[in-house]
Amino acid sequence: MMMKANIETSALDWRVIEFKEFTLDELYDLLQLRSQIFVVEQDCVYLDQDGKDRKALHVLGFKGKKICAYARLFDKGDYFDTCSIGRVIVAEDERRYNYGHALMTECIKAIKAHYREDRIKISAQKYLKKFYESHGFVQKGEEYLEDGIPHIGMIKT
């Protein structure tokens, strides 16, 4: 049986947790996934463990015990004057299911539920501009390089 390309949010089991709620296995799997995508796949040498994870809320999409989608959220005032979403990833072998859209929906819901905010900032890789626009984000400012990759600032209000 062939899988549909458009999978609903419920196709994954979603959890929104604080850093202290990770099991050791989940944390290891997450850090491995982030390194696989940001360091290996994107050929970008940088320190992923930037000291910010302890302050973040973490949005995880699981298929069984496998982390398929992830992002971290920050409250207004943590690092920016608005709430923010970062480290947005979907495992390479899961991208065909469009889990990125479900992940963004879950992130926006989590920010509204936990932080009671509608305004959200994201530092988006430029090639994903239309993806984020489909979730209500608009570009603010000019393109810039972050870790050697073209990015744009985007805001959702």
Image (cartoon, rainbow, N blue to C red):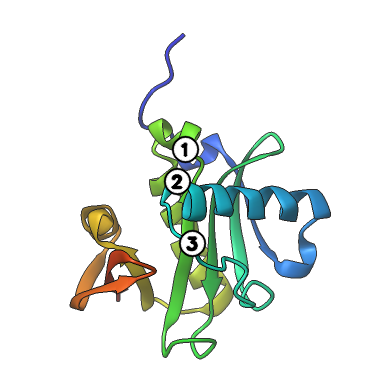
The residue that appears at 43% across and 19% down in the rendered structure is 3
Q: Quadrant of residue 8?
A: top left
The residue that appears at 42% across and 52% down in the rendered structure is 43
Residue 134 is at least partly visible in this image: no
Q: Secondary structure at mark 3?
A: loop
Between tags 1 and 2, which lies in front? 2
Q: Amino acid at mark 3?
A: Val
Which mark is drawn over residue 45?
Answer: 3
Rendered location of residue 80, percent (x, y):
44, 87
**Which residue is under mark 2?**
41
Q: Quadrant of residue 132?
A: bottom left
For residue 144, side relative to residue 100 (left or right): left
Q: Amino acid at mark 2?
A: Glu
| Circle 1 residues within 10 Å: few <14, some 14–19, many ≥20 | few
| Circle 2 residues within 10 Å: few <14, some 14–19, many ≥20 | few
Cα distance, mark 1 to mark 2? Answer: 9 Å
Q: Secondary structure at mark 2?
A: helix
Callout 1 touching callout 2 (CB < 8 Å): yes
Residue farthest along the left direction in this orientation: 142
Q: Quadrant of residue 63?
A: top right
Which mark is drawn over residue 108?
Answer: none
Rendered location of residue 90, percent (x, y):
48, 45
**Which residue is under mark 1?**
92
Q: Is residue 119 above or below residue 33?
A: below
